[in-house]
């Protein structure tokens, strides 16, 4: 099943300060983590994009698939605002570049839960964490996001808690391994 009325975006514009190198360009089996996520999402969604501060994606021939976040500040809320304002679809599935072990079926379950209900946001959750940047976000959030940014609120957690949302529980915490350090990256490589 390919979702046509909802697009997907890989968030690949972070600083990667704890990793000390750009996570988006790290190679897993000779493929950048960005391409791993992009290829995975392309099996599920008709339209897939990459959000970043700059175009650094050699594998991508269609440069219209890159959403450039031109704001100098690094903030997931700013990135989400940029994405929602540029998408023609009314909802978008967001996935960070640094969770490459997430399963296609997990993504489908999140999107299915969003499509069957009347939520503004549906995100993944495991026994340890809510994964705020692994889920579906509605374009109806734009005015709320604009207000939060005007008030200097940049936490996606705040947006979720103050919106009509649902958390979908998953038991496999390993698929949500967030690669922030070199040790995390080694652990991820062992899990592939």
Image: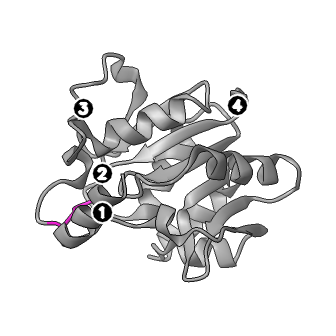
Q: Give the mark, 4 or 1, whose residue is nearer the N terminus.
A: 4
Kindly tell me whether residue 179 is visible in this rendering.
yes
Checking the image for residue 13, the label placed there is: 2
Span of residues in magenta: 14-19
Marks 2 and 1: in contact by CB < 8 Å?
A: yes
Which residue position is annotated with label 3? 57
- Neighbourhood count class around disc 4 (C-alpha, 10 Å): few under 14, some 14–19, many 20 upward: some
Assign a secondary structure to mark 2.
loop
| Vertical comparison of 83 with 113: above or below | above
174 or 146, which is in the foreground?
A: 174
Say left or right for 157 vs 96: right
Kindly tell me whether residue 68 is visible in this rendering.
no
Marks 1 and 4: in contact by CB < 8 Å?
A: no
Which residue position is annotated with label 1? 74
Which residue position is annotated with label 4? 3
Furthest-top residue in this view = 61
Q: Give the mark, 3 or 2, whose residue is nearer the N terminus.
A: 2
Checking the image for residue 150, the label placed there is: none
- Prevailing secondary structure class for the magenta stretch in the rendered image: loop
**x%, y% of residue 78?**
43, 59
| Vertical comparison of 172 with 91: above or below | below
Nearer the observer: mark 4 or 1; the answer is 4
Separation (CA) of disc 1 from disc 3: 19 Å
Nearer the observer: mark 4 or 2; the answer is 4
């Amino acid at each position: 099943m390919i979702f046509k009325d909802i697009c997907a975006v890989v968030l690949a514009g972070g600083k990667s300060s704890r990793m000390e190198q750009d996570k988006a360009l790290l190679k897993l089996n000779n493929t950048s983590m960005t391409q791993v996520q992009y290829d995975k999402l392309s099996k599920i969604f008709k339209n897939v994009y990459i959000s970043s501060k700059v175009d650094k994606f050699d594998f991508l021939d269609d440069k219209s698939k890159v959403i450039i976040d031109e704001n100098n500040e690094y903030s997931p809320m700013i990135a989400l605002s940029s994405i929602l304002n540029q998408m023609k679809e009314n909802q978008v599935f967001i996935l960070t570049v640094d969770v490459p072990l997430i399963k296609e079926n997990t993504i489908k379950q999140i999107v299915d839960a969003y499509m069957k209900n009347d939520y503004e946001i549906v995100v993944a959750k495991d026994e340890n964490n809510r994964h705020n940047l692994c889920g579906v976000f509605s374009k109806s959030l734009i005015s709320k996001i604009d207000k939060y940014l005007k008030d200097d609120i940049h936490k996606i957690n705040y947006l979720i808690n103050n919106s009509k949302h649902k958390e979908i529980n998953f038991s496999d915490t390993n698929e949500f391994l967030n690669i922030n350090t070199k040790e995390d990256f080694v652990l991820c490589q062992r899990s592939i």
